[in-house]
Amino acid sequence: MERPVPPPPPVLPKHTELSPQQFAFLEEHFRTREDLLVGAPHVSAALNQRCADLDADLLRLQRDLSNRAVSWISRSFAARTSIHRLNLKLENLSLRSAPHGIGSKVWREELPWLAKKVRQIEGIRNYVETSLRLEALVGDLEDAVFRVMNSHSGTLFSAKDSGPKQEKLLQAIKTMNDIEQVLINIVKFQPQWCNLLKSVDARVDKILAVLRAQVFADHRAVLASLGWPPKLLTSKIESIQISGIPNPLGLMQGDKRESYSHSFVDLCALQHLQKRREERQLNLLGRKEYNMQLWAIDELVSPIASRMEYHFSKWDDQPEFIFALVYKFTRDFIVGVDDLLQPLIDRARLLSCSAKEAWLSAMIQMLSGYLAKNIFSGLAERYRQKHMKSEVMISWLHLIDLIVAFDKRMQSLANLETCLFLAESERFEGLSRGISVLMIFCDRPDWLKIWAKIELKVACKKLKAELKDERAWIIDNKHGSALHINTNTEQYLLSTREYHKAPSISESALKISWELIERCQTMPDTLPRLKFIRSAAVKFLWYFFEVLRLRFQRTEFPPVNSNDDALIRLCGLINAARYVESRLQEWSDDVEILEMRIAENDSNHRDKDGSIDNSCFFGQEIENLSELETNWLMEIIAVILREFEYLSWEYVQNKDHFEQKQAALTPVRLPATVDLPLSTDFVEALDVLRSQLHVLKTSLNPRDFLDLWRSVAEGLDHFISCSSLTSEIQFSDRGVSQFETDMQALLCIFQPFCARPQAFFPCIKETLKLLNMNKEEVRHLQVVLSTGENGMKCLHVHGISHLPFDQVDHLLRNRKFGT
């Protein structure tokens, strides 16, 4: 018997065949021969133990995954096959992990891959379960709709068996709601399943179309059996004799009432389902939208519209009859609709739905549709013909007047019993803006543009008519003295035309502009309303600004001897601009206008060029008015200073007043504190200045007059202080007293405007202070080196802050001191 051949001894791998990790492992444990002889058994035992632990972990993981996988794949052959393949891979991993210490590869590479596969299996399981659930629900829906369609014998809601048939229909709608809830969850948590969504939607849409058509047909049959719509008595409309119309809904009794109630509730349930589907398909989940339309009430209005349009066509030239008929029918039925149908809406559990509002909205939409199709379309075509524009403008504005009045009357109907379950904001949006015939212009920007052009032309004509009367520019200052008496009403008076002393033409312009803004307040959509205001009201304001600018350009100011009429005329322009500016600021703080401004910013309706005040609706207009006011104020200040300079030129150039001991003086009434009479050639300048300031105080609004007299004081202070230095005057003691007397007279002119006028003449004050110093005081003046605002070093005299050092030095060097 041959001995078995022993296996060949293991051969060590070559040095170049070792991986970097293996090489590092050997370097760490076997640095010397002694490490190889002594530590090799310990390292081998540690490696064997680690491999055994890893094998045990892998076996536990294999058993655990097998148990979990078996429970997951009960309904999926594909999943069972994948788990089997994973088991094989785990067995291979177990075999590969022992010999050379490479089991760590499992943790680095294989386990992440394994987790990914598990997630894929979970996704497949969820997809299969959802698909099977939807398949079952769609099957139930098809069966329910089939039973509903087979249960019809002529009409769905007969008095005999309307109850069981309604139950079948409601069961079908409930199944569709269950399907919709599953689809909503898919959209929220599994949006990648788009093909599943499309396939289910396609099947449900086909079923829903069949069911909806049948339900509408049955509902119309029920309405016809009730005698709806009622007859229209238009002869009384034309003779302005409006009487009540009997309501067939109020005459329902017994089985007919029960059948209609079932039909109404089912139609509401179907509409609620349709709304959920549209919200999900349009990605509107989470948004609350207030919609006043109800299919059941639209079905009441639809047959009425076909009858009314026959009469409307005879009244195209008398549209007031159209509005009267619609209002009459709406008013006669609104109470019955609210009393009979609101309980049915509550029974259908439709939140934030009102039968009365839905009735008003449906009637207005019916009227709007007719006006858009048969009247405004023709007017828009004729407006494009030049020879027809004037006629179209009259007809267009007449229609708008009728619409505005009609909207107010419908609003009064809606406000009879305001729905208490609506929030304030929803109530305002729903009642004020949703119920409006002006919805015509929301979808037709070309008609909106025509309307704005017509309104702008008419507004400009109104203003031109008022401008023909020159009395429109007269400044009303009768209330000027009373404004400072009652301080309790000061807050209120600050916003009045009397406080601003504005001419009546400014009030007229604001009134016309605000009427244009109110003209479109019931328009449902914000952006069309915003566009109309920008195109009509705001453009009209700019037209008025141009009127103010042209009137200023026609105002002549002679270089000297300016008349008071020119000043008063310019004051009227400033007051008008200031008053309009204050009112525009008030309008910008209005809630509705603030909402429009926010919508304008969000939609980027206007170009953002950086010059528009994003926090104010009328920011650009206010900025323009402020610029006009500033320019015109500067013009008045320049006129005053230029004339004062002309009249006082001889005074400031005449050195004899201040250098000689005796001067040619004229006796003039002096203030009590002055010992010397005024200089003769200074009297006329002061008299003209006093007269001009008195005229301006009477004619100019208080805010701008305050800025004006302070600016005039600053200009005079600078002019006199500089002139006294450039004239090379050597002041004697008597000359100093004369200069002080003249300046006190100048300060007295500003005494009525403030308690301490010398505070607004700092240069003159410091000049008098220097001139009244004796030699000893001048000798002890301190010169300080300081840094100016521009960063440069400069000298100034301690205690003198307004006069520069060179002027102070020049003044003191020319000072003649007496004995």
Image (cartoon, grey):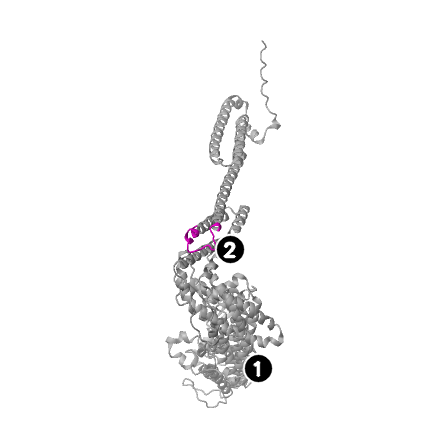
Residue at mark 2 to residue at mark 1: CA–CA distance = 73 Å
Question: Where's residue 178, x and y in %?
Answer: 46, 48
Q: Residues within 10 Å of mark 1 (few under 14, many from 20)?
A: few
Q: Is residue 457 magenta?
A: no
Quadrant in which the N terminus is drawn: top right
| 256 and 366: which is toward the camera | 256
**Mark 2: which secondary structure?**
helix
Answer yes or no: is residue 44 visible. Answer: yes
Magenta stretch: give its range.
149-167
Report which quarter residue 727 is drawn in. Answer: bottom right
* Number of the label disc, if any, that sits on residue 595: none
Spot occupied by residue 13 in the image (x, y as percentages of width and height): 60, 25
Question: Residue tagged by mark 2?
Answer: 213
Q: Which mark is residue 554?
A: 1
- Along the viewing direction, whichever of 306 and 470 lies nearer the viewer: 306
From this viewpoint, which residue is outermost toward the top? Answer: 1
Sequence order check: which comes first, mark 2 or mark 1? 2
Q: In the image shown, does 160 or 461 lie closer to the viewer? A: 160
**What amino acid type should be assigned to the residue bearing mark 1?**
Arg
- Under mark 2, the amino acid is Ala
| Left or right of 417 in this view: 549 | right
